[in-house]
Image (cartoon, rainbow, N blue to C red):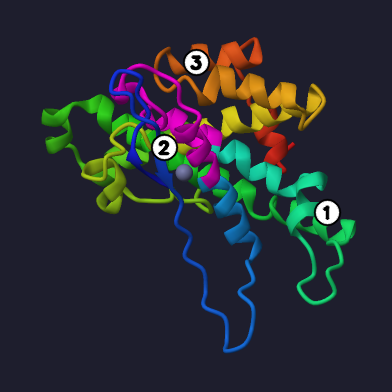
């Protein structure tokens, strides 16, 4: 997702937003079919698009997806889960020859497969995110003089994530995201956004699922607000309280 024009009352601009999806070119005469990964990416990016399109703020710098990195992936990851909602599936998940709906059993298998390897994935991610924080707490001068491997080992131990079988996703020496990649002390952002997304999705379904009322509340409190309030306050406006990590653990099959 990207934005050509950001919505802003000040400039009287309406949002112009684009989604681009690269998919494998089918063989001659065959239809282009999407893998589940591609479907989930499509929903994800459309979540960003909705964030840009429903923006209703005064200043362009606070508009749409111009929000911190640990919040911007919330609407997108939230939308991903709707790809497996029964009513949504009925619209798109049809056999390309027979037109038959996807069998419920297959849907259950997709949901079960999402939990595969999540213990490993979650720990390696958390280890990397904690390491990122530790480095950026050091300050530039101290970081320059640090014994890189020694500091890394010490940090992983101190955070209780020094598990030999699950090394951090990136070792300090090639953890490019956190040095020049823009993630400095922000590598945790995807997982934090997922905490919000999982908790919000749970809230949606506790309150009746895909109703106009629920959609409107999400639009009014989150999608239209950009960065006109502290992101946690936006979340509380939607949810009534701060998120817990419970729904994330269930989403990842860890609970
Ligand atoms: Zn995204």
* Residue at image location 50% in from the left, 23% down from the top: 224
Q: Which mark is residue 129?
A: 2
- CA distance for labels 3 and 1: 33 Å
Q: Which residue is drawn at the image coordinates 52% and 36% (left, top)? A: 50
Name the element at disc 2.
helix
Residue 114 vs 136, above or below: the answer is below
The mark that comes first in sequence, 1 or 2, is 1
**Is label 1 or label 2 in front?**
1
Judge whether residue 253 can be spotted in this image: yes
Of callouts 3 and 2, the N-terminal one: 2
Name the image quarter holding residue 254.
top right
Which residue does the image show at 40% across and 35% down from the upper left? 15
Q: Write down the region rendered in magenta.
A: 46-75
Residue at disc 1, secondary structure: helix
At a point 47% along the width and 65% down the height, the residue shown is: 22
Magenta stretch holds residue 217 = no
The circle on residue 108 is 1
Location of residue 131 in the rendering, given as x and y in whole percent from the top left corner: 36, 37
Q: Give residue 46's mark.
A: none
Residue found at the very far bottom of the displayed protein: 28
């Amino acid at each position: 997702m990207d934005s050509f024009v950001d919505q802003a009352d000040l400039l009287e601009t309406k949002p112009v937003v684009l989604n681009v999806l690269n998919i494998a070119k089918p063989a001659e005469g065959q239809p282009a079919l999407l893998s589940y990964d591609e479907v989930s990416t499509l929903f994800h990016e459309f979540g960003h698009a909705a964030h840009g399109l429903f923006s209703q703020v005064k200043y362009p710098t606070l508009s749409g997806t111009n929000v911190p990195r640990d919040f911007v992936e919330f609407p997108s990851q939230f939308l991903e889960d709707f790809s497996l909602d029964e009513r949504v599936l009925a619209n798109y998940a049809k056999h390309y020859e027979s037109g038959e709906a996807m069998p419920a059993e297959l849907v259950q298998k997709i949901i079960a497969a999402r939990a595969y390897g999540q213990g490993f994935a979650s720990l390696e991610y958390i280890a990397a995110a904690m390491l990122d924080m530790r480095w950026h707490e050091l300050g530039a001068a101290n970081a320059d003089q640090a014994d890189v491997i020694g500091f890394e080992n010490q940090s992983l131990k101190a955070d209780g994530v020094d598990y030999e079988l699950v090394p951090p996703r990136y070792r300090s020496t090639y953890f490019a995201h956190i040095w020049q990649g823009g993630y400095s002390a922000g590598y945790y952002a995807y997982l934090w956004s997922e905490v919000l997304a999982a908790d919000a999705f749970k809230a949606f379904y506790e309150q009746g699922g895909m109703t106009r009322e629920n959609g409107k509340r999400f639009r009014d409190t989150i999608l239209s607000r950009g960065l006109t309030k502290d992101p946690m306050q936006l979340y509380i406006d939607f949810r009534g309280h701060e998120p817990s990590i419970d729904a994330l653990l269930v989403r990842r099959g860890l609970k």
